[in-house]
Image: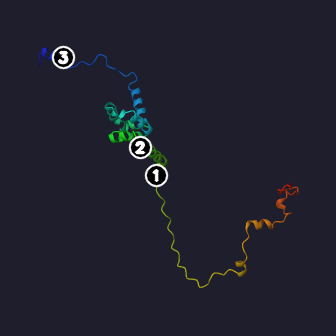
Amino acid sequence: MASPEEMGDDASEIPSPPKNTYKDPDGGRQRFLLELEFIQCLANPTYIHYLAQNRYFEDEAFIGYLKYLQYWQRPEYIKFIMYPHCLYFLELLQNPNFRTAMAHPANKELAHRQQFYYWKNYRNNRLKHILPRPLPEPVPPQPPVAPSTSLPPAPSATAALSPALSPMQYNNMLSKNDTRNMGATGIDRRKRKKGI
């Protein structure tokens, strides 16, 4: 066994816990909400462009913070995320080439357009893959048609010579006293040109 003097030396080597340890009054709820809000802001390409323009991506501490935030991809945290694109952008932000590219406005617009098209077509594209397609109805085989020796009737010569009436000619065929132009009281309701 060790002597009390030796134990005293070992006890002095073990650091004592700091007297002023910080205890979060709300149990980490505020930090959780702040990180959740920040990570969901990453779903917006305009915000990522803002961060790149203001040189946040050149700060090593900020890059370390982005690496730290990858814990949001775990199932126990992912259920709180409303905008899943933020996780994709968080993964892309781990690449230095993407971080520098997002400083350019054209790349911001490209990312924004691609995100829009994804949202626009996601449901239809997804339904194509998950809904079963109905089987085509089998077509019963048709009996072979025997060649007919009779010819279709030829149009008469008088029908071929008479021209078809134009819509204007139909209007002239109505009589001026036609009941379609008269109201219930028998008054002619057609508009007439007023004499000058």
Amino acid identity at mark 2:
Asn
For the N terminus, give its image quadrant.
top left
The residue mark sitting in front, 3 or 1, is: 1
Mark positioned earlier in the residue sequence (3 or 1): 3
Mark positioned earlier in the residue sequence (2 or 1): 2
From this view, report whether residue 102 is shown above or below residue 130. above
- Residue most extreme to the front: 196
Q: Is residue 44 visible?
A: no
Question: Could you tell me how far apart the alpha carbons at marks 3 and 1 are, in whole angstroms?
Answer: 67 Å
Mark positioned earlier in the residue sequence (2 or 3): 3
User: In the image shown, does 107 or 131 lie closer to the viewer?
Assistant: 107
User: In the image shown, does 20 or 173 lie closer to the viewer?
Assistant: 173
For the C terminus, give its image quadrant.
bottom right
Q: Which residue is mark 3?
A: 12
Q: Which residue is mark 2?
A: 107
Q: Which residue is mark 1?
A: 125
The crowd level at tag 3 (other Cα within 10 Å; few <14, some 14-19, many 20+) is: few
Which residue is rendered at x = 83% and y = 59% of the image? 181
Query: Circle 1 sits in a helix, a strand or a loop, which is it?
Result: helix
The crowd level at tag 1 (other Cα within 10 Å; few <14, some 14-19, many 20+) is: few
